[in-house]
Amino acid sequence: MRIKFLGSLLSLICFFGFSQEEETPLDSIAENMIIIEGDSIMRNAIDLDEFYVFSQLRFSNYDEKLRYYILRRKTLKVYPYAKLAAERLTTLNDSLLKITKNSKKRKYTKEIQKYVEGEFSDELKKLTRTEGQILIKLIHRQTGITAFDLVKELRNGWRAFWYNTTAKMFKISIKEEFEPDLVNEDYLIEDILQRAFSEFRLERQKSALNYDYSLLTNKWATEKKQNK
């Protein structure tokens, strides 16, 4: 269930706390306005980031529990790579906007490719097939673009095709999308991420895709009950 704590509630609590120390009532403006350090604009509420209250994990059987915890271990392992890929892509796109000549754009893109490949390659070689597939999905989650299209955009269509064909030999599709509304495993990955963000085990990075985690939770919980 998603909960938004409104700033007005916080200001009300603060008011009652301070009123016990002050004998003279505050005027109406002071009662309802808040000054935030570093901000010259007075506010009557404080905007807080939304966060989720998670229900306790419950599993139908041991196999389901084992599957979730294995998926969690793999997701926590590969998420930082997907986050880094999104950051590098943003940096690349921002830089390309400032470059006018196509030849310089191609040269800069190749330099970024070599840098990213050097940064990723050794670690990615250590990933298992399932970890690699989760990474592909998370890259789509973080960038809004499939790994296939990223390769196609940064190199060319033939190289993207070759990468995808090679990946298929290892049962990995770089065209894979992250679809938590349609694929239960993708929802479980999202659930794992949201819990890890709330526990500060992972640094939060907003998904580039458009979906609502709380609505997904209700959807999959309902389907699970119906399938019992």
Image (spheres, rainbow, N blue to C red):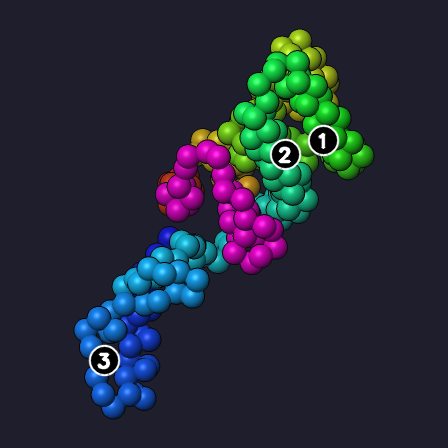
> Mark 1 touching mark 3, by CB under 8 A?
no
Boundaries of the magenta span: 190-217
Q: Which mark is residue 116?
A: 1
Identity of the residue drawn at 25% across and 90% down: 23
Q: Which mark is residue 26?
A: 3
Q: Quadrant of residue 151?
A: top right
Residue 137 in percent (x, y) is at 58, 31
Residue 146 drawn above or below residue 188: above
* Along the viewing direction, whichever of 22 and 195 lies nearer the viewer: 22
* Circle 1 residues within 10 Å: few <14, some 14–19, many ≥20: some
Residue 143 in percent (x, y) is at 54, 32
> Mark 2 touching mark 1, by CB under 8 A?
yes
Residue 195 in percent (x, y) is at 53, 53
Q: Is residue 206 left or right of residue 219?
A: right
Determine the secondary structure under disc 1: helix
Identity of the residue drawn at 21% across and 84% down: 25
Q: From this viewpoint, is residue 225 visible?
A: no
Q: Is residue 91 left or right of residue 110?
A: left
Which marked residue is nearer to the observer: mark 1 or mark 3? 3
Instruction: Kindly identify the amino acid type of the residue bearing the numbered disc 2.
Output: Arg
Determine the secondary structure under disc 2: helix
From the image, tell me which residue sits under label 2: 88
* Circle 2 residues within 10 Å: few <14, some 14–19, many ≥20: some
